[in-house]
Each structure stands twice: as C-alpha cells, then as structure tokens.
Image: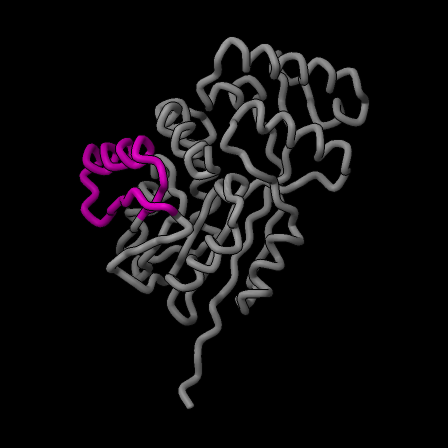
C-alpha cells in the first residue's frame, strides 16, 4: 500500500475522531495561528492538508475567502458540513492530493498548512505547490511538531507516532523547515517555537485504535516511562499523562518580482 493510500484509509476511517479531538478544535491555538499569520479582510487564503477544516472555518470571518484542500474524502465531507451549518459562503473545500493541487482560483495572498507536514513523504513537493499558489509578496506559513534534538528521544517517539497513527511519516526538524524556505527563495519573516503538552491518551484517541494497536502503544509507553531520558518528555498533571512536544510555526514572504 502506498503512503497516500495509507493516509487516505487512516483519515477516512478516523475523520470524526480527528474532528472531535480537543487539539483540532482548540480555539486558543486557532486564534494564535490566525494572529501569527496577520489575517485580514483582504486575504485570500489556501489551507493545505486542511483536515476537517478547523483553521479554514475559524479564519473565514477574518478573510475575503478560503479554499481548503485535503486528500481524505472523509475529512473534506465533515469540513463541508461544518461550513454549511455555519452558513459560511466564502469557504470551499476540495478533495485533492496536496502534492498535485489543481485549483481554478489563484494565486492566494496567504498559503497555510497546519499540523500536517509530518504525514508527508514528499514534503518538498508539497511546499513547492504552496509557493506556486502564493502570489508575489504573499505569505507562506507552516505549523507543525518538531523533531527532538535528542536522537534517542526522537527515535522512541517516531516509533510511538507510527503506532498511534499509521499515516505518520516523519517529524521534521526546524532546520529542515528552514531549508524549505531558503531553497525556495522565500524570505523568512518570523519563527515561533512553543511547547505543547498533549494529553497522551486523548492523543491516542484522535485516531481509531484497535485492541491490538492499543496493546502495542501501552507496551512501548511502559518501556519508555522506565527510561529517564524518555520519561523526561512526559509530565503528570491532575491525573493526566501529558506528552511534551515542541511546535514550530514559521512564516515567510514570497519575494515580489520586479518587472525589468
């Protein structure tokens, strides 16, 4: 089964779980990203790998228009339902492979991808498409989890991510994100590193799990908690096990071409 087929199957099956997940619908996080992007009524936004459309829908009242693209029909179906229920007429969702986006409307003043690059094997190609659909002088923003600097921790949690979500491909480093912008000639404008504390079991539940997958996740977790280096990435709070994850939010401008 190809990487894209795995992603489609996983997200079609778990679209409702993903939509119900507390992080997906966290309005504080959505507002933080909206403010970071500096959205305005003049903006025409493209949301790449939009999932069930949380950021597109949140942003719709702040911008002129939004187009959301995702490879999963299940995700897009839920996004469209939300747009209808909220009577949002300036939002459209498309089920397309984000490596090969084909939209009539272009270019966009801002192109965003939230919490999705870790699913992408051909992430350079996806970013290239984001650049192509961005107007000269427009902004390109990525927000996603970052790889751990500690190699042992990073290896352990990559194993954990794949056990939880088979569509996880790789958590990229801050340097790899920087290189995307540099190699595409996008001028970095701002970078924000934050620390997220995810409720571990809530995170596990954002994907549909089988009895077998839950067992494997528990076995790996138990091993990790016995190792001080791995255990340092967890904290207990109010009876919950929280997983400490760094998040990178980065935005740059597509350099405006000067007519000769």
User: Where 183 sits versus 256, above or below?
Assistant: above
Q: Is residue 108 magenta?
A: no
The image position of residue 114, as x and y in percent, is: 46, 44
User: Where 165 sits versus 42, above or below?
Assistant: above
**Nearer to the camera, 216 or 244:** 216
Instruction: Looking at this view, name the residue that lies furthest to the bottom.
Output: 260
Q: Is residue 162 left or right of residue 11?
A: right
- Colour scheme of this structure image? one colour
**At 48% across and 41% down in the image, what residue appears?**
116
Which quadrant holds residue 56?
top left
Q: Is residue 44 left or right of residue 179?
A: left
User: Where 176 sits versus 147, above or below?
Assistant: below
The image position of residue 170, as x and y in percent, is: 59, 39
**At 27% across and 54% down in the image, what residue appears?**
65
Per the rendered image, the range of residues in magenta is 68-97
The image position of residue 248, as x and y in percent, is: 59, 46
Q: Is residue 77 magenta?
A: yes
**At 24% across and 46% down in the image, what residue appears?**
92
Which quadrant holds residue 146?
top right
The image position of residue 194, as x and y in percent, is: 61, 42
Q: In which quadrant will I find the C terminus?
A: bottom left
**At 60% across and 65% down in the image, what residue appears?**
182
Which quadrant holds residue 13?
top left
């Amino acid at each position: 089964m190809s990487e894209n087929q795995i992603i489609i199957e996983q997200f079609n099956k778990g679209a409702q779980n993903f939509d119900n997940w507390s992080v997906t619908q966290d309005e504080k996080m959505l507002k933080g990203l909206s403010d970071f992007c500096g959205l305005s009524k003049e903006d025409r936004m493209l949301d790449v790998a939009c999932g069930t459309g949380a950021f597109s829908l949140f942003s719709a009242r702040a911008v002129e228009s939004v187009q959301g693209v995702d490879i999963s029909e299940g995700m897009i179906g839920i996004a469209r339902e939300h747009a209808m229920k909220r009577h949002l007429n300036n939002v459209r969702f498309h089920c397309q492979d984000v490596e090969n986006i084909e939209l009539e409307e272009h270019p966009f003043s801002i192109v965003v991808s939230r919490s999705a690059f870790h699913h992408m094997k051909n992430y350079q190609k996806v970013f290239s498409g984001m650049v192509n659909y961005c107007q000269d002088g427009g902004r390109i923003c990525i927000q996603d989890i970052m790889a751990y600097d500690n190699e042992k921790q990073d290896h352990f949690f990559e194993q954990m991510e794949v056990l939880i979500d088979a569509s996880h491909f790789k958590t990229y480093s801050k340097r790899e994100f920087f290189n995307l912008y540099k190699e595409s000639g996008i001028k970095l404008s701002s970078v924000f590193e934050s620390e997220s504390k995810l409720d571990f079991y809530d995170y596990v539940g954002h994907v549909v799990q089988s009895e077998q997958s839950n067992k494997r996740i528990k076995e790996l977790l138990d091993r990790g908690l016995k190792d001080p280096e791995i255990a340092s990435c967890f904290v207990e709070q109010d009876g919950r096990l929280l997983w400490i994850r760094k998040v990178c939010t980065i935005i740059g401008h597509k350099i405006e071409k000067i007519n000769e």
